[in-house]
Amino acid sequence: MTARCKKRRQKNKAIKRAKNKVKEVKKLKKMLGFIEEDAGEGSLMDKLKDITEQKKQEAEMELVKKEAKEELIKQEEKVYVKKEKFVTVVNPKTNVAHRYNVKTKRDQFGQYPVWYKPHKERKKLMIRQGKDARRKQFRGKRMHFIDRTNNWKALLGQ
């Protein structure tokens, strides 16, 4: 390809660009909704006003929905708080208030306190319910206790 040929092509492309620029800008504005074929400049401002009004209404609706949600949550929490007892503890490092349920020993995030050992708690519960009988019955040196009223020798002989 020669330099003269390249120069000529560049010049022709520049002319086409200049000619088509007006059409392209008009097409882009039409796509974006800034101009309409039938309407003049006044409608553009009206359209922009409508858009801003819609945005304001949407923001107001979101605020109303958020407030309604917060009220519902507060009402549900009040009902929940009445049935269960809570202890509030504030973490000194993070300043986050944890509301621990006395019955389940969990806070509002579902976490146990640092000092809580679930295995130990489970053992205590089993002893209270009487399911872990060997811990409750035999303490100290009475591990090989045999009930004298039972005829165990006769049972072993059979």
Image: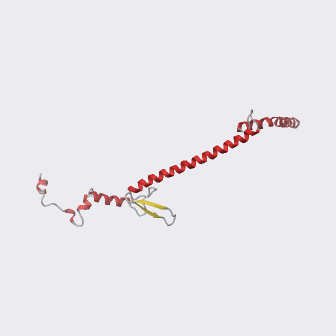
Left or right of 115 in this view: 129: left
Q: Position of residue 67 (x, y in %)?
A: 53, 51
Could you say which is closer to the camera, residue 155 or residue 60? Answer: 60
Q: Nearer the viewer, residue 52 or 84?
A: 52
Name the residue nearer the viewer: 59 or 46: 46
Estimate the x, y position of residue 66 in percent, counting from the top left: 54, 50
Lateral position of residue 10 relative to residue 89, left or right:
right
Query: In terms of depth relative to the viewer, which is nearer, 41 or 3?
Result: 41
Residue 149 at x, y percent in the picture: 12, 59
Q: Vertical placement of 67 versus 32: above or below?
A: below
Please identify the residue farthest to the right as the structure is shown.
4
Question: Taking 56 as reference, is 135 left or right?
Answer: left
Q: Quadrant of residue 53?
A: top right
Q: Residue at x 71, y 36 (%)?
A: 31
Whether 53 is drawn above or below 133: the answer is: above
Give x and y (percent) for residue 108.
Answer: 45, 56
